[in-house]
Image: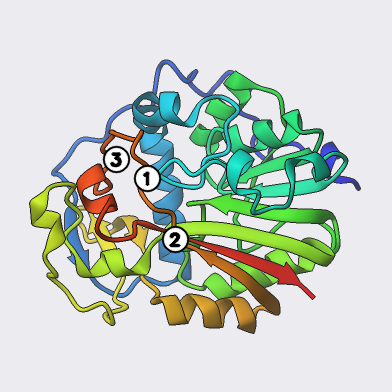
Amino acid sequence: MTPDTYEPRQDPRDPRTPGPEEGPEPEEGLEPEATRRDAGEAESSRASRVWWDGNADEYQREHGAFLGDDRFVWGPEGLDEADAGLLGPAAGLAGRDVLEIGAGAAQCSRWLAAQGARPVALDLSHRQLQHALRIGGVPLVEADAGALPFADGSFDLACSAYGAVPFVADPVRVMREVRRVLRPGGRWVFSVTHPIRWAFPDEPGPEGLSVAASYFDRTPYVEQDETGRAVYVEHHRTIGDRVRDVVTAGFRLVDLVEPEWPEWNAQEWGGWSPLRGRLIPGTAIFVCERD
């Protein structure tokens, strides 16, 4: 089966699901409690699905204009793949099979399609894929990044802009799956929150410039409900950890990009801001190849 034959496992066109303009019913109860505690693979996966299904509408409203409908942005700094060429020269993308992991509304995949590539956009969140389907233009797959539903050697390239990798308890499992579905010589490029940010408060103003925690504390960040059930999980890895994960999964690290904050970008995005971006890195992009 070739990549362009795949369909969402759960069809976002199902009339039983609300349209993107409606949104899911808000859950009653207290605000989630933020803590640092262990969270395993199953709990992390479930929390990510719940959180992104519940917050996809707000996320797309808040950041959709910046991301565009067919722009490939690697992070809040606004580094554009059209300029960076981390997947290779744009002119060389035509006819290439590309898997986007944690695609959200599939903006990156649409940019790839505009260059003549054959992208497939994969996400864990049914709700994010509804937004992707609303905008249209690329094949969609709803699946977990740790169990990719593709045959070995299905793709030439794989990419992920802040998708999946920060939210999984076992990133090596994800990367081994990516390696499996890549053809020999295939490139895997992914961006994550720069690990140094875990030592600072997640605030865009001056309060976010003072070290408040140990960079070496790998305890996951968890938001949990009143019963202790995780509703959001994010996992910290140091730069060294990420490099070892890449190598352990069988990739060769080609480049590590730390985008500087550009003068034109005046936006604040969560803890990202011009103030912090001019002083400390906010994004790390790993460029890897399958030998």
Image point (85%, 38%), residue name: 5
Tell me which numbered mark, 2 or 1, is placed earlier along the sequence.
1
Q: Position of residue 231 (x, y in %)?
A: 31, 52
Numbered tag placed on residue 269 in the rendering: 3
110 vs 229, left or right, is right
Kind of residue at badge 2: Glu
Q: Position of residue 25 (x, y in %)?
A: 33, 27
CA neighbours of label 1 inside 10 A, class few (<14), some (14 to 19), many (20+): some
Q: Position of residue 109 (x, y in %)?
A: 66, 37
Kind of residue at badge 1: Trp
Query: Of the residues tagged 2 and 1, which is closer to the observer?
Result: 2
CA neighbours of label 3 inside 10 A, class few (<14), some (14 to 19), many (20+): some
Task: In the displayed orientation, state which residue is furthest to the front.
Answer: 263
| Rendered view: 56 above or below 61 | below
Look at mark 2 in the image and give the residue it sits on. 258
CA neighbours of label 2 inside 10 A, class few (<14), some (14 to 19), many (20+): some
Query: Of the residues tagged 2 and 3, which is closer to the observer?
Result: 2
Image point (33%, 39%), residue name: 263
Kind of residue at badge 3: Trp
Task: In the displayed orientation, state which residue is furthest to the right.
Answer: 1
Determine whether the residue tagged by mark 3 lies in a helix, strand or loop.
loop
Res 10 visible:
yes
